[in-house]
Amino acid sequence: MNPSLKLLLLLLIALEISFTTIVSLNIALVLLAALYLLLKGTKFKTLGWLLIVPLLPAIGLWSTQYINGSGDKTLMAWVLFTRIYAFVFTGATFTLTTNILQLADALEQNWHLPSKFAYGVLAAYNLVPKIQHEVQIIRAAGLMRGQQLSFWSPQLYFKAILVSINWSQNLAQAMASHGYVEDAPRTHYRQVRLRLRDWLILGLGLSCLQLGVFVIPWR
Amino acid sequence: MATIALNNLTFTYPQAVAPTLQHVSLTFTSGHFTLLTGPSGTGKSTLLKLMTGLLPLDDPAAIQYDQVNLSAIDQTDRAAKVAMLFQNPNQQFAMDTVENELVFALENRQVDPTQMAARITAALDFVGISALRQRKLLHLSGGEKQKVALAVIVAMDSDVILLDEPFASVDPTARASLLRRLVQLRDKAGKTIILADHDLTDYQALVDDVVKVTPARNIVPVTVAQRPALFQAFEQRVSTTTTWPQPTSGQPAFKLHQLALTQGQHQLLQPTDLTLFQQHVTLITGPNGSGKSTFFEALVRLHAYQGRISYAGQDIQRLKRRAYARQVALLFQDAETQFLNITVQEELAQSQKHAAGTYFTTARIQQALAQLNLAGRDEQVIYTLSEGQKKKLQILLMLIMQPPVLLMDEPLKGLDLASINALVQLLQTTLAATQQTLVIISHQLTGLTPLIDYHLHFDQQQLRYQGVPHES
Amino acid sequence: MKWAKSWTLSDVILIALIGIFFGAIFMGTNYLYDVLTAALTPFGLAGLANELLLGIWCMPGMLAGYMLRLKGSATLGELLAAVVEMFFGGQWGAATLISGVLQGFGSELGYIITRYKHYDWLGLTASALTTTIVTFGWDLAKNGYLKLQLWLLVLYLVVRFISMFVFGGVLTRLITDLLDRSHVLKSTHTN
Ligand SMILES: Nc1ncnc2c1ncn2[C@@H]1O[C@H](COP(=O)(O)OP(=O)(O)OP(=O)(O)O)[C@@H](O)[C@H]1O
Ligand SMILES: Nc1ncnc2c1ncn2[C@@H]1O[C@H](COP(=O)(O)OP(=O)(O)OP(=O)(O)O)[C@@H](O)[C@H]1O
Ligand SMILES: [Mg+2]
Ligand SMILES: [Mg+2]
């Protein structure tokens, strides 16, 4: 499916379930998403991981409602508990099967997102591992000067921004030298199509969701 | 094919007081390989950026390609005329893999998608890196990244290729191979090549023209008669290697037990047993990319390793980070990494406040500042200092901290000879009083030799003491 | 698309990088979040951990808005940080994006109502306030806050505002003061 429409569908689902209080719908979404992931060859281990990671916040939300809620505390507690899992599993159907490059291609080609946004973010994204290392270096350098840089120290962010400024200028120049011109037309090697089929899946998905929300009365 | 003319080119950075380049008039001949030299900070990178159109010009006629003003060439066509290969291989790519980067460049050039695969294959073949096609750029070595950058330029088929110290992080083999491709590009494809470098080794037989930046901020050709003198300095530098004795016994600072280092898939060091000695100065040399900086990062726990490193008898993984950082400090390759404040005065005060020893009194600091020609800059913002000044300040700050062990990564980078001598003198007097342990990575040995006790060489995944072995 | 024209490629890369850097720094606070959540769960106050630390997660947007002073910089700063987070280790999927947009727009709103003229404490406070309100509105639905007892809601709201003000206001101001004094932002810090 076209990555941009897939994301749109998932955004709409996430939005809608944020305003509904149907436990069974949340569970159905989790099951559907898990099934989809399995069909796409996702490992059981990954699915297990998806079950464990949100457990703490899910319990936190559950207990908040159960102890300090008003109205039907038990229902709301379970709604929130399952809602977290619905977010995580539907989200995973996107992040585990689509990469940022595919999304950028679709947004650029199908929705005419100015390419500087697509490639600017991609260039930065590809530096993520380097950035994680750089944060360690900044911290270590601080310790060697006798200063602990914690997440509330302005200097830590200041240093990070200095590095960002430096790298952003280098990257922008390098891209210019690779022929990139802002707002200039480009050709596309990886063609991303927006087919009728994609729209149909989007429509179908949304319709099913409405059935689950409004028509089928199971709670 | 393109001839480039500089017509009375003058350029001043927006915030700078004096121009970086002044009244430069020069012609680069089409199909020639030109070497651009000059001391650090004189404007080589600035010139190349101007020629690529990355910096704005006041006078549009100051740079012309085949009699056409650079600014008049449509931006989208510029890449067909001129492309640049940068000094730092790490921030040169927008995409994740080699192939995707090439695709990105060809898309920018609006190449027909059906022709792209063939052009990419040809470019990779030409540079000899077909095997890297699907690799992640992040996992490549510096030399490999520079080859990819060259392949991008080959694929874009730019007439003029500008290279800004392209070999700064490249080992000798990769350097030789890249140079061979450049010569081929000139001879077979008629490309015009302009390359800036400090290290002039190997160029004599390859280049057609040599130009240099003068103290008057001009750029002038170096005549054929003057060239041997220029190049000879580099041939000599290679042959004058001093030897130091191998260490015999002493108090160990670090003990390495079966230490092995990797970067990604790349093995840098085979399992090695080694001792680094206290209260001595050990020099580490080795080609670019051999893993010297990575070794230092391992010593200060910024890089994972196999085997064991112990400091003063204890496994460094067992020590508290904070306490360990006060024992073993690293002088980073990039001076700015070490700064935490804004003005020179603030930095000095911070170091003095947290110093591990008391050697650097206010009077001694003032004296050292004078010695390093940094006096009177107390209120200056450190980020406006020149690279050389930053380096000297960085070293002074770490000396004031007085950690028992100081690891220095390229402390002489970007310094002129006067600064080096002043610095070495400061180090000598300081060490005599503080008995600190120093380990220094340096390519440049001029001026440094009086300081050194032992010499380690890092090459071919081996880290070994050099020099005459003592009776054992 | 006039707003898109005033952004340069290096601006886009810069705020994406800042978002990632901040994200990498915040990763270190995850354990804090976990410990707090676990400790507060038995009292039904787990949300308090979220309220206390939310200001940190809204920092990229608030800082980008204050630092770059371009229309849309707060929204884009937070959105780009969210995009990267979604693909790199974020488990919350599309919900991350929705939160990102709302947080960013919340911060932007503070500058909109001060007409992009108050890059001072007024603007920062307004931004902290609007970020609090907008994100709180979203949590009324998403995290079921609507169904909580009133005293708890008020407590959460106050704590959230304090967090926004401390991290997005005070800390942002301290950081940008350092940047101003360092003279490195001259080129982008005008207009
Ligand atoms: N953006 C800038 N603003 C102000 N001054 C600058 C800027 N960039 C460089 N300079 C100054 O211009 C001078 C020339 O710098 P340039 O980078 O061109 O030197 P270089 O010859 O390439 O040096 P190196 O060999 O060290 O790379 C230096 O004094 C430098 O401090
Ligand atoms: N994050 C990284 N991922 C993969 N490879 C890396 C990374 N950082 C460095 N490398 C590679 O590891 C090798 C060793 O790098 P290192 O910086 O230790 O070399 P060096 O000996 O200090 O070189 P130089 O003399 O240029 O400073 C190089 O080939 C480099 O390209
Ligand atoms: Mg240079
Ligand atoms: Mg190094």
Image (tube, rainbow, N blue to C red):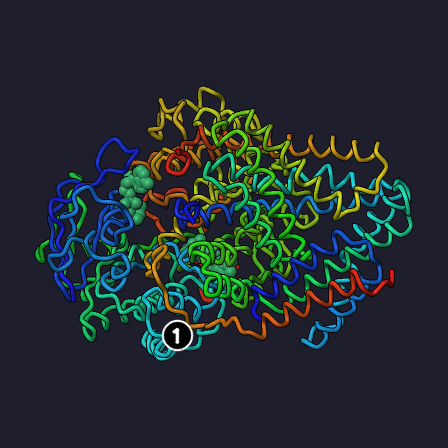
Camera-side residue of A192 and B91: A192
Q: Which residue is drawn at 40% across and 60% down?
A: B287
Camera-side residue of C28 and B235: C28
Q: x%, y% of residue B254?
A: 59, 50
* Quarter the N terminus of chain A occupies: bottom right
Question: Is residue C48 found left or right of B307 in the rendered image?
Answer: right
Q: Quadrant of residue C52 in the image? A: top right
Whether residue B435 is visible, yes or no, is yes
Q: Residue at x 59, y 29 (%)?
A: C126
Q: Quadrant of residue B382 in the image? A: top left
Pointer 1 residue: B129
For label 1, the crowd category at 10 Å Cα-Cα, with few meaning under 14, some 14 to 19 and many 20 or more, is some
Q: Residue at x 52, y 51 (%)?
A: B296
Q: Which residue lies furthest to the front in this view?
A: A215
Which amino acid, by three-letter code, is at mark 1? Answer: Ile
Question: Is residue C88 found left or right of B85 in the rendered image?
Answer: right
Q: x%, y% of residue B139?
A: 50, 65
Q: Quadrant of residue C187 in the image? A: top left
Whether residue B328 is visible, yes or no, is no
- In the rendered view, would you say B401 is above or below B448? above
Question: Is residue A29 found left or right of B40 in the rendered image?
Answer: right
Camera-side residue of B409 and B311: B409
Judging from the image, what secondary structure is the residue with disc 1 in? loop
Q: Which residue is drawn at 36% across and 45% down?
A: B413
* Quarter the C terminus of chain A occupies: bottom right
Please report, as a chain letter, where disc 1 is located. B
